[in-house]
Image (cartoon, rainbow, N blue to C red):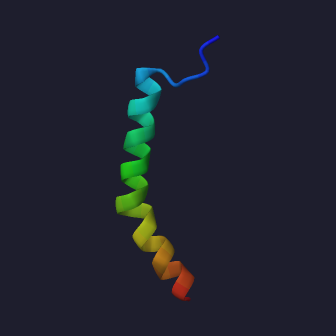
Amino acid sequence: MNFGLTKTQQLFQQMIREFAEKEVKPLAAEVDDT
């Protein structure tokens, strides 16, 4: 059995990671300060 991610899943994971780094992380820092 292959339990690894497919190429499509890997690309999706990378896209989500990049989105989180650019969009979510800065907002999280702002929320943490309040």
Q: Is residue 13 left or right of residue 18?
A: right
Residue 2 drawn above or below residue 17: above
**How many numbered marks are there?**
0
In the depicted structure, whether residue 18 falls above or below residue 2: below
Q: Quadrant of residue 16?
A: top left
The image shows residue 11 at horizontal and vertical percentages of 38, 32
33 to the left or right of 11: right
Residue with the most extreme bottom position: 34
Relative image position of residue 25 (x, y in whole percent):
44, 67
Residue at x 41% of width, y 22% of height: 7
Q: Residue at x 36, y 51 (%)?
A: 18
Specify the quadrant that holds the C terminus.
bottom right
Residue ranking furthest to the right: 1
In the image, residue 10 lies at what x, y percent? 43, 31
Residue 13 in which image quadrant: top left
Q: Quadrant of the N terminus?
A: top right
Q: Which residue is found at the position 55% from the left and 23% from the top?
A: 4
In the image, farthest residue toward the top: 1
10 and 23: which is toward the camera: 10
